[in-house]
Image (tube, helix red, strand yellow):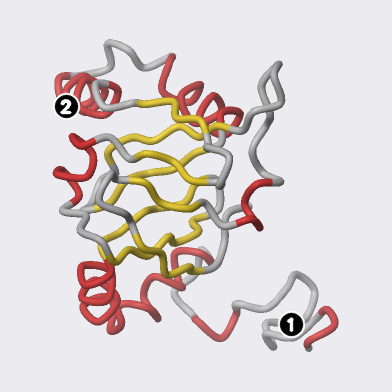
Amino acid sequence: MFSGESELVMDEKGRVSVPKRYHALLAPDAEGDLSVVLTRGFEKCVFLFSKPGFTRFTARLSGQAFAGAKLRKLQRLFFATVYEVKLDASGRVNVPDVLRKAAGLRSELVLVGSLGRAELWDRATWRAYQRESEADVAELGELLAGTEDPDTLGTAGDGGRGGGGAHG
């Protein structure tokens, strides 16, 4: 699972380090090299997938190839910018110029874990997104809980007290 936040610096050649904690999520190829799949994100970011993670993600879309004009448009725009990129000996990936431009990436970046993928953001854009989204956190939390009552975010069987586990 991709999680956490890492501040990174992209060099003038468009290379950025993939944090070591993510290397274990990447499947080595036949030569033992690690690679990632990069593509345009839905906001001003670049999605970073492991190859198996990208395969799982695309499997959900494959049965919907002709589902409607909007979905076809999304598929074209999304898959036109898919790049498989190997990590170099220093654990860096080269972010293609088209993706850097689409996401507005400059030199100071943030890599944000988002479960099945990570997202590469320009640091200033990410911080602005966080500030703008802060007021929505409680409402967004309700999506995770599947309920209108944020007090019922606890684990199953705890009576909605929010407890349970080692931390409850």
Where residue 57 appears, x then y in whole percent? 49, 31
* In the image, residue 27 above or below residue 138: above
Where residue 17 appears, x then y in whole percent? 48, 53
| Residue lying farthest to the top in this orientation | 66
Q: Amino acid at mark 2?
A: Lys
Q: Amino acid at mark 1?
A: Gly
Label 1 sits on a secondary structure element that is loop
| Pointers 1 and 2 in contact (C-beta within 8 Å) | no
For disc 2, the neighbor class at 10 Å (few under 14, some 14 to 19, many from 20) is few
Residue that appears at 31% across and 54% down = 11
Residue that appears at 51% across and 64% down = 144
Label 2 sits on a secondary structure element that is helix
Residue tagged 1: 159
- In this view, the residue in front, 100 or 154, is 100
Q: Which mark is residue 70?
A: 2
Q: Is residue 158 left or right of residue 44?
A: right
Q: Which mark is residue 61?
A: none
Q: Is residue 122 left or right of residue 94?
A: left
Q: Which quarter of the rendered picture does the C terminus lie within? A: bottom right
- Nearer the N terminus, badge 1 or badge 2? 2
